[in-house]
Amino acid sequence: MTHSNFLPKKEAELTIFLASYLSGLTANRTTLALTTGDTASQTTYCNGISTAINNVSIQKANQKNATASKNTTKKANLLAIQNFIQLVKKLPNYTTAIGNALGVIGAANPFDPSTFKTVLTTDAFPGYVLVKYHKGDADGINLYARLQGVTNWTLVSRVNTSPYADTRPLALSGTPEIRQYMAIGVMSDTEIGLQSDISTVVYGG
């Protein structure tokens, strides 16, 4: 059976349509010679859809509130715990053995600008290539790109926040291309460390 396209695609508009439909159906029941059973069944169907949609909206709102509450509680309580741990570490009888028992001695992992090497991932979407990277303690990266088969790299942008959307157009309009990306860490406007591994993506524009 083929249905007309009068049904709204968006659920917010669909609930409005259903309420209007039921109102009109009830107002015209006698004219259309419909039985009370007809309108009762339609009411059940419409209300079932609206209730299901509203339940999802409520669950989303509750989830959002619960997540916000969790993040607030975690941030405040972890800060209090960290402050207390710092006090414990200053007590006269505190030892490294006690610190290990409490699990409050972190592994040393100093940032070395000379060996820093970021990791790139790239994904193609309509109109842009999304570039994600890890910057560690660097200020950001210099992002370079080239077409496969080209030797020289072209600086795309200085990037401080991941991810980055490369919206440059195709070299030849309508012709998909294979792009290669590479990045180098930056601190105080100076490139540091090693070039990243090359990330390759097919971009269709």
Image (cartoon, rainbow, N blue to C red):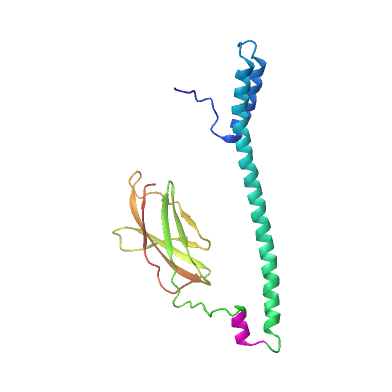
**Which residue is at 60% across, 37% downward?**
53
- Residue 159 in percent (x, y) is at 50, 62
Q: In terms of depth relative to the viewer, which is nearer, 126 or 16?
A: 16
Q: Residue at x 31, y 58 (%)?
A: 148
Question: Along the horizontal axis of the image, is 62 left or right of 10?
Answer: right
Foreground residue among 153 and 61: 61
Residue 14 screen position, x and y as percent: 59, 31
Q: Is residue 61 above or below residue 49?
A: below
Q: Point out residue 187 in the picture as x, y percentages from the top left corner.
A: 51, 72
> Is residue 13 shown left or right of residue 145?
right
Could you say which is closer to the camera, residue 141 or residue 71? 71
> Does the magenta segment cover residue 57?
no
- Given residues 53 and 203, the one toward you in this image is 53
Q: Residue at 56% x, 35% y: name it.
A: 10
Residue sitting at the far left: 149
What is the magenta range?
94-101
Q: Quadrant of the N terminus?
A: top left
Q: Quadrant of residue 178?
A: bottom left
